[in-house]
Amino acid sequence: MNNRSFDSECKTDQLFPESIIRDNIKRLVPYSTARDESSISFGTYMDANENPYNTGYNRYPDPHHKRLKQELALKMGTIDQDMIFAGNGSDEAIDLVIRVFCTPGVDNVVSISPTYGMYKVAASINDVEYREVPLRNNFALDPEAILKATDEKSKIIFLCSPNNPTGNLLEKSSVIRVIENFKGIVVIDEAYCDFSSEEGFVPLLKVYNNVVVLQTMSKSMGMAALRVGFAFGDSRVISYMNRVKYPYNLNRASQEAAIRRIREGSRSLGIIISERERVSRRLNESPEVIRVYESETNFLLARFKNASGMYKFLTANGVIVRDRSRTPGCEGCLRITIGKPSENDRLLSLISGYGKDKFILPPNPFIEISRITAETAITLKADFTGGGLSLINTGIGFLDHMLNQITTHGGLSLELDAYGDTQVDFHHTTEDVAIVLGEALNRYFKSVVNNRRYGFSLPMDESQASVLIDLGGRAGFKWDVVFSGEKIGDFPCEMLSHFFSSLSTSGKFTLHIKAEGENDHHKAEAVFKAFARSLSMALETDLSEKFPSSKGVI
Ligand SMILES: *Cc1c(COP(=O)(O)O)cnc(C)c1O
């Protein structure tokens, strides 16, 4: 979030827009939640028909987002809590501003083009006319043209800075010219401000009260799935937005996670910005690229010689970018979101191979599988760059623990969710997890051209395990492990050989496994660790020999 300080200019009431708030909204008696009507903050709650038994979520969440706003106000330093609206993404704020100020079928809003698509969609849903004013050739704002497009029925001007999809900041003096000469609300969407080098528009809130600034936790803070966005503005505007929103628009999990995240801050910002600059330079050197636009965001807009051909080629190879080539002003352009360094490398090396006959594709390190049968439902996302966070939940604690050995020692990360009939026994879930994981391994190792094929490992734990792997494409399985008990915790030991034999069958590779030791748990753990090590050995390649380097090519 942008927390740079205000100028010390004084605020004027001249532009206060209360007169343009819809009459029905002014008259609206908002829904009052049960707890609003009582001043007791802690008691025996028998007012809201909730279930009294604690599930973590049995009580309704705070409709006023008090702690969240407190945290954000603290972080920003210059914004009072009553100037903050918290919504289900900033998309909710876009819709609410329209609903508070625009009478359907009568009023209109004005925006720039090209820009973020939701302003138009939200206006259309509300039956509000949407007027677009093209940016200038260099994507600069044309304040006179914007003002000329307004009339007495224009209630809102939507601006976006840094703008999506063009990536540039709007000139501050031009924006101020619009604000000072418009009698309605000017919304400035700053979804990308954290990636920018400039201070942004929050300081203007101190000076103008017809300004609403939007920010979001979806981009720089890495919280898109939470759906938390903010609007900052005059407390009267914010209070109207709060009256119109659903009472419980932000669920408890999102509020809590947002609070934690604001406290922590985003650590990935620096690397994303430096990757943006690196990818931009490399793209600029590519013969396929006509131009890369300057960006103050986490994406790059690039004009290609053959945008649709490039788009199809990238998609066919598992890299999805946004095709903006048919957007007026962005002809021939693709919008590319900056990824992790390894993802950016994959993109760059694909672009360097575009149109070349002898190009060997780099392996796709991201594999997704979902498999649903009568007994289990499993989704798996594997990232063989190892850069991701592993989240494994099979419903069997011991199996999770063992799979974590594979990710920790095997150089890959896994997001794996399995819902199985574990109340019956662990058989189906264990077997099906092995089948899905085997398939993912098989898909990956087939794409690693000239992998080493063989792997061998013998870790030096107090339990010893040796695992031989041959990725030759044929399943084969030998198991030489004897457990002293029948179970480890509640996990039957025989399931371990079954896991690896299913893995080998589904992955079409040969496994020879041996282990010795005193403790069954340690023995099992040594087997998983050893498997992970041999796997990563077998998958190794010398990249410089196998793939044409993209260095010096693009
Ligand atoms: C992504 C984006 C948003 C959406 O934000 P949410 O908080 O996820 O709803 C808003 N504005 C712009 C310009 C965006 O690019």
Image (tube, rainbow, N blue to C red):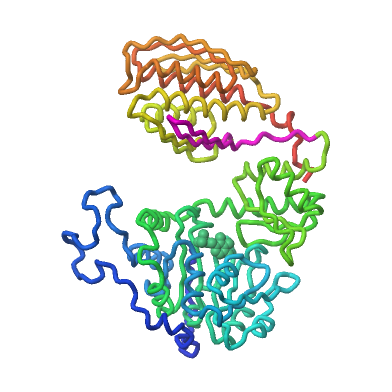
Q: Is residue 381 magenta?
A: yes
The image shows residue 158, relative to residue 423, as above or below, that is below
Residue 194 visible in the shown view: no
Instruction: Name the spot of residue 95 as percent of width and height, x first.
Output: 50, 70
Instruction: Name the spot of residue 552 as percent of width and height, x first.
Output: 78, 43
Residue 178: which quarter of the image? bottom right
- Would you say 139 lies left or right of 379 here? right
Q: Is residue 10 magenta?
A: no
Residue 223 visible in the shown view: yes
Query: Depth check: 49 or 529 in front?
Result: 49
Magenta stretch: give its range. 359-384
Instruction: Name the spot of residue 134 as percent of width and height, x first.
Output: 70, 74
The tally of labels here is 0
The image shows residue 237, relative to residue 327, as above or below, that is below
- Would you say 337 lies left or right of 293 here? left
Q: Residue at x 58, y 80 (%)?
A: 108
Q: Residue at x 57, y 13 (%)?
A: 476
The residue positioned farthest toward the left in the image shown? 44
Query: Depth check: 9 or 432 in front?
Result: 432
Instruction: Name the spot of residue 441 as percent of width and height, x first.
Output: 57, 27
The image shows residue 220, relative to residue 13, as above or below, that is above
The residue positioned farthest toward the bottom in the image shown? 14
Q: Residue at x 61, y 36 (%)?
A: 365
- Quadrant of the displayed image that contains ligand 1: bottom right
